[in-house]
Amino acid sequence: MCLTTYTAEALCLVEDSIFSEEHVVKSLVAVGFNNVQLHDQISLGNPNDSTGPSTICPCLPWSNSESSKSDAVTVATDKKYGSKQVISVTPRLYNYILNNVRESKILRELREETSAMHGSQMQVSPDQAQLLSMLVQILGAKRCIEVGVYTGYSSLAIALALPEGGELIACERDAKSLEVARRYYKRAGVSHKVDVKHGLAADTLKSMILNGESCSYDFAFVDAEKRMYQEYFELLLQLIRVGGVIVLDNVLWHGKVADPLVNDAKTISIRNFNKNLMEDERVSTSMVAIGDGMIICRKR
Ligand SMILES: C[S@@+](CC[C@H](N)C(=O)[O-])C[C@H]1O[C@@H](n2cnc3c(N)ncnc32)[C@H](O)[C@@H]1O
């Protein structure tokens, strides 16, 4: 066994800094290198030596354990992607992402109040809300639509990102959850920007089209009945201007869309929707693995 000396600092540089120094130190302590500190010299097997270190640490980059490779990265199985590694969100990594979201106090309070309510898992995650807010800002959007408000977390994020004269049409069929949403719009000082439409979203969108509002909106977010996605999309495509954006949530549907053994009605519906969108020349698209998967569509 060839032994080489490393510092914990150097170890973390292996594999493109996937591992922090603290992580390496903790990993070493976990496998018996007691009292290791950040800049200590540590004798291990050479990572380039196929036999690896004498003490296999499951968390170190050259470990023989598969778990070290699959923990935070996924490799494309199709070799034509050049063994491309992409990030795979572990609980620890997701906590890190959440710790890097700038969530306003009012959004945090709404999220926390909703967390005790029935259906709380339905609200978008803070990183998703931040992305929606970012898209609204990049677009310079003034007129927005949301389909599926629930207690208002995503709509509040959108309304907060809108300029003073901006407007959000917020479609929701459940009166009880709208009570919470309205309370938070008021507390956040954005009630004047949000026009709540209580009822079935498709009816609201159809009446907006009949009202001559086609091509007058900049941005739409869809997060309601999954089997209605194609219909919502068609209606919103009429309401959105060229260059405007439609974002749809849950397009990865807990991963079920990629599993050929799962064929319930909602999964099939989202799978078909995604497939149609791939072939839809009216929009450019980008599928993003955030939350339960979002697809961003820009009207051509
Ligand atoms: C996933 S939740 C929305 C979560 C919300 N975007 C958030 O971040 O808190 C879906 C919401 O869509 C509403 N919904 C479902 N079908 C609807 C329909 N046909 N018309 C209007 N709202 C509907 C449900 O009542 C539910 O509140």
Image: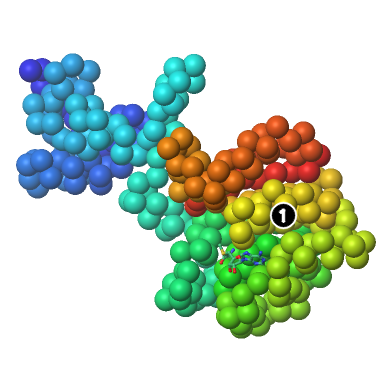
Residue identifier under label 1: 232
Q: Amino acid at mark 1?
A: Tyr
- Quadrant of the rendered structure where residue 143 is? bottom right
Q: Is residue 33 left or right of residue 167?
A: left
Q: Would the CB of label 1 be found within 8 Å of ligand 1?
A: no
- Image coordinates of residue 252 in percent, x first then y, are 52, 45
The residue sitting at 88% across, 56% down in the picture is 214
Q: Quadrant of the N terminus?
A: top left
- Image coordinates of residue 133 in percent, x first then y, are 64, 59
Color style of the picture? rainbow
The reply to whether residue 88 is in sight is yes
- Image coordinates of residue 278 in percent, x first then y, are 66, 34
Task: Tell me: residue 279, above or below residue 248.
Answer: above
Q: Is residue 241 left or right of residue 96?
A: right
Asked whether 118 or 5 is in front, the reply is 118
The reply to whether residue 126 is in sight is no
The residue sitting at 66% across, 51% down in the picture is 229
- Image coordinates of residue 146 in percent, x first then y, are 69, 63
- Quadrant of the rendered structure where residue 33 is? top left
Asked whether 231 or 197 is in front, the reply is 231
The residue sitting at 54% across, 50% down in the picture is 266
